[in-house]
Amino acid sequence: MPSLSPLLLAASALAALSPLGAADLDAPMRFGLQATAARPLQDLGTITRRTGMGAGAFAEVDQGPGWTLRTRIDFLAFKEDAARTRTLLDGLMPPRALKVSANQFSVGVDLRKTLFPLRVRGPFLLAGVSLSRVEFETVGPVPSGAGIGWSKEKSSVKFGLAAGAGYRFTDALAFTVRYASTNLGGLTMASVEGGLEFRFPAGWTE
């Protein structure tokens, strides 16, 4: 699992944005949980074709009519997949049958715009930035061809972007579809993510 220390520091910095907005507008902070399924694309789709599953948590504050600022923490796991890869990870030889898994931990901030601010239900748009760390594990023939080997590669913390849309069914439940992409220095970690969100009632922590 990816090392969390640098990302927790980043999460603290990103989370500081939300309380500032809450203080200015005297708006309560809302908390919630999310479950995510992600379809890998681009280089990630080359490494593994299996749908990733994940979970996360968020805190958000109202920024004015129709606008919401959300701080989020996410974990995505792309399970082991038999795939033919290019030389995408250090130490791997060109195409070779491997089993690859990838774990991604990220913290970020989303800005959301509700299209009908006076309604609880309805569609919304979102755009966000994030900091991510990814860990790859590979099992397969070693470059010399002598037997089976195992290796683990960790990326440094990288900047990512996301954009998407969603629909709020009730004050508590919403569904989102978002495209997220992070460049790991020549390797593009991209996916289309579908997420089901549950938001706790305002003031439930009081």
Image (tube, grey):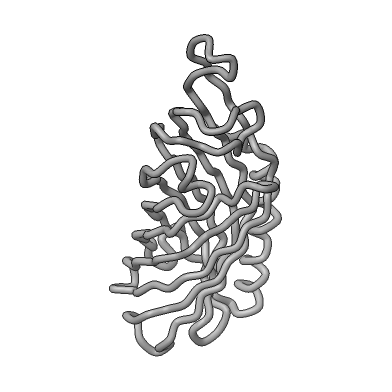
Residue 188, horizontal then vertical, whole percent: 59, 51
Figure label count:
0
Q: Where on the picture, by quarter, is residue 82?
A: top left
Horizontal and vertical percent for residue 167? 35, 74
Instruction: Identify the residue at image location x=32%, y=80%.
Output: 121
* Rendered location of residue 189, percent (x, y): 55, 50
- The residue drawn where x is 43% and y is 28% is 99
- Which residue in the rendered view is the most extreme toward the top? 146
Query: Residue shown at 48%/22% (left/top)?
Result: 139
Residue 194's quadrant in the figure?
A: bottom left
In front of the other: 199 or 75: 75
The answer to whether residue 199 is above or below residue 77 is below
Q: Left or right: 130 with respect to 192?
A: right
Q: Which residue is depicted at the point 45% across and 28% down? A: 97
74 lies above or below 202: above
**Looking at the image, residue 184 lies above or below residue 66:** above
Front position in the image: 127 or 9: 127
In the image, 190: left or right of 38?
Answer: right
Q: Nearer the viewer, residue 104 or 84?
A: 84
Q: Determine whether 143 is above or below 195 in the image.
A: above
